[in-house]
Amino acid sequence: MKIIFLCSGLEPGRDGVGDYIRRLAAALIRLGHPAAAIAINDKHISEKVDDFQVSENVSLPILRIPAKCAAKERFGLAKKYIDSFNPEWLSLQYIMFHELWIGMAKESSVKQQYWGMAQKFIIKRLIRKLNPAVIHTQCELYQVQLKLIGFQADRLTLFGNIPNIGKPLTGDMASLDGDLISMVLFGTIHPDAPVDQFASEVAQYTQCEHINLKLCIIGSTQNEQNRWINAFEKVGLPAEAIGEQPSEVISAILNQATIGISTTAYAMTDKSGTVAAMREHGLPVICVSHPYHPKHIENLSLPLGVSEFKKGNFEECFNNRKIFRSDSSPNKIAKKLLESLIIQPSVITK
């Protein structure tokens, strides 16, 4: 079964959807199914790239088309590549819904709700126009929302964006694991998280229990990183931002950490690649995010091993944390994808 994935960008480490596609496509190739990927609006290049990218020792054929090219040229280049590869399936990574519309939460502003209504209208028109044979999403909340507007979507559980190399830290980085309790926050840090309240409760708990704790922040979201560092240092807790790191270094840090911290809203935890990576490394995760409660939707089946921080409950989150190592590997998800396609008619007209 030959599959081409279409997405926006394929710059390694700079595009979460691109990173996801690269690992999923590589898993398909390992299973004996030819795959390729096209970035149709890549903002990280100035010239067309027709080459290969390597993911976990698998070479994936890719075409990257610069965003600066006119739409007609970009679509023409994509069509030529698709015709040459001659796939049975096109996986449009906008019908694999990584995102839907804004304004879903009770806390959403009036502006967000109206903007979300417009986005919902566009999505409905897109699905009806394309009439896809299969629709997927990674998030149960999105699956429910799509059902409410009349479309059946299957779930493809998300795997992490950092492969678990199973190795310890070495060299200068090894000192990061010198504390009894080490918290790790990496990836996108969303604004408006109650970081001051969280840091205050962490400090109070560590003082009462005589625990040494350090926060390690990985990534490049500098303004929000500074908020977290300042909040922790203000209550006497050490915190350090180590910037962007290779995936093998991040994996080693996660393997030696105690707790993962996420700023993704709890109701959308299952769409976070960083949360998935933490769980695959055996880390319990605490969500520290702004309030987000979906309207008219309750009792979502969220990932095991993840708790939600609320004012006054850090001790409960810490003491009730359960280590749950996720088994949502790229190979497992690739097999599930294949199963959903085998019983469907191909979307490519021969």
Image: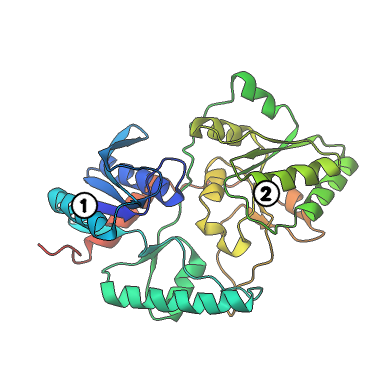
Q: Amino acid at mark 2?
A: Glu
Expressed as whole percent of the image width and height from the top left, the position of residue 62 reads 27, 43
Residue 324: tell me if it is visible: yes
Q: Nearer the viewer, residue 296 or 318?
A: 296
Expressed as whole percent of the image width and height from the top left, the position of residue 255 reads 58, 34
- Determine whether, in the image, residue 193 is placed left or right of residue 305: right
Q: Secondary structure beneath disc 1?
A: helix
Q: Amino acid at mark 1?
A: Leu
Placement of 83 over or under 252, stated as above or below = below
Expressed as whole percent of the image width and height from the top left, the position of residue 72 reads 24, 60
Quadrant assignment for the C terminus = bottom left
Q: Earlier in the sequence, mark 1 or mark 2?
A: 1
Which quadrant would residue 32 be assigned to in this image?
top left
Circle 2 residues within 10 Å: few <14, some 14–19, many ≥20:
some
Expressed as whole percent of the image width and height from the top left, the position of residue 79 reads 19, 56
Q: CA distance from mark 1 to mark 2?
A: 39 Å
Q: Nearer the viewer, residue 160 or 230?
A: 230
Query: What mark, if any, has residue 224 been given in the picture?
Result: 2
Which residue in the protein does label 1 denote? Answer: 77
- Determine whether, in the image, residue 154 is placed left or right of residue 298: left
Residue found at x 72% / y 44%: 226
